[in-house]
Image: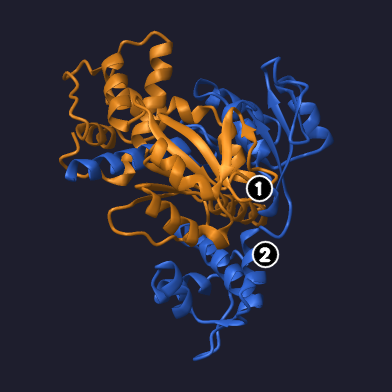
Chain colours: A orange, B blue
């Protein structure tokens, strides 16, 4: 399925289509065209058709895509259909928040445990997920391996923790810190700098106010 | 300060520089060059110098930037220094998680309250933040206005809630749903599709495994 590398912008748009298709299916639609999707979510129909061509599903000319088939194929393709095990590193503020997010499991991610060094967090459970001392990570990883590490440590610990968790066997890092971590070539990094998005929003909001 | 529109990629990189500078300052550094920043975070020195030119601070040739000055100017520029009031819409999974994130206030965002329609959530407090019924939003907004709305409702409610909260006076929407919302031109939208990032990571992880 992944013979060719799917461009990242495509991968980011596919979940938008999926979200819209699920909505349309819930409203009783059974067939949908890229033009209909385009009108609903402000992406051009040609872009949608191009993006969908990566997932090897083709619509019928003048009819469109079978909506339930398309949902199924998209979910499988995006990896939302199977469970990916993850450990979370840094169970404070944002880390603790992510442990509370039951939505992640709906999108195929199961957080097995959190790790921290703060005695007020270690030994507790957050939303039913245990928080262990960081020193236990190698042993836990041996007992119950996870391929994904969610990085929510303080920024000054970002690189050090990255090196440590890769040594233990993590192969993909979901980096929520604003720090640009360095990793060996075979390690996948996904940066999700939510505070950087905040900065973009503040800036746009204030530019708008000046124009008033 | 915002006479020219700062490109979004620049706005997204500035918090990386800020994170690194704070680390370097904590380690006792007082002066820093764009080459030093470049080596630490894998962005080219010329890109860094270009990005920093937007914030009207200039380094001294062959010496570099005063690190404390640069931190202060960056924080002000990014809006992390002042408090932006926000209301959160949808206090379930991810919304509830964000209410738990004490980190947001460190980056200049204060969530005044959450809104929901679920009787199990309405009337509760999460991390000291009250959750009200969505029907109370107009009245609350009148009493204590917020300019930012954090959108964490289920995807099928995304557009409807967007329209409703804009009518009440929200001017910027931080959209965490995977739905592409439509808004009037003067409304700022920042999309943070964390589940879309998840899809990118799953795909890269599985492509990597196939190559083994």
| Residue under the image location 70 percent in, 21 percent down | B121
Foreground residue among A5 and B143: A5
Q: Quadrant of the C terminus of chain B?
A: top left
Residue B36 placed where, x, y %?
A: 47, 78
Residue underneath mark 2: B76
Q: What element carries label 1?
A: helix
Q: Going by the image, does A146 lie left or right of A63?
A: right
Q: Which chain carries label 1?
A: B
Horizontal and vertical percent position of residue B35 = 44, 79
Distance from Cα at disc 2 to Cα at disc 1? 16 Å
| Residue B152 in view in this figure | no
Is A175 above or below relative to B131?
Answer: below
Label ID, residue B159:
none
Q: The disc numbered 2 marks a residue on which chain?
A: B
Taking the spot 55% from the left edge, 88% from the top edge, the residue there is: B60
Snapshot quadrant of residue B197:
top left
Residue at 36 percent of width and 37 percent of height: B199
Answer yes or no: is residue A94 visible: yes
């Amino acid at each position: 399925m992944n013979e060719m590398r799917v461009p990242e912008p495509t991968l980011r748009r596919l979940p938008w289509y999926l979200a819209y298709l699920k909505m349309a299916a819930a409203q009783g639609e059974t067939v949908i065209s890229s033009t209909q999707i385009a009108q609903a979510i402000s992406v051009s129909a040609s872009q949608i058709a191009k993006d969908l061509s990566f997932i090897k599903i083709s619509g019928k000319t003048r009819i469109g895509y079978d909506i339930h088939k398309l949902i199924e194929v998209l979910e499988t393709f995006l990896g939302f259909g199977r469970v990916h095990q993850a450990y979370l590193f840094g169970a404070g503020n944002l880390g603790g928040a992510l442990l509370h997010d039951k939505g992640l499991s709906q999108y195929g991610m199961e957080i097995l445990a959190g790790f921290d060094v703060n005695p007020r967090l270690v030994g507790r459970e957050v939303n039913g997920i245990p928080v262990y001392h960081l020193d236990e990570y190698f042993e836990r990883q041996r007992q119950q391996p996870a391929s994904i590490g969610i990085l929510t440590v303080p920024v000054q610990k970002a690189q050090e923790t990255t090196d440590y968790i890769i040594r233990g066997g993590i192969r993909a890092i979901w980096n929520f810190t604003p720090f640009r971590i360095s990793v060996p070539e075979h390690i996948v990094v996904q940066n999700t700098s939510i505070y950087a998005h905040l900065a973009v929003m503040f800036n746009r909001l204030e530019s708008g106010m000046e124009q008033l």
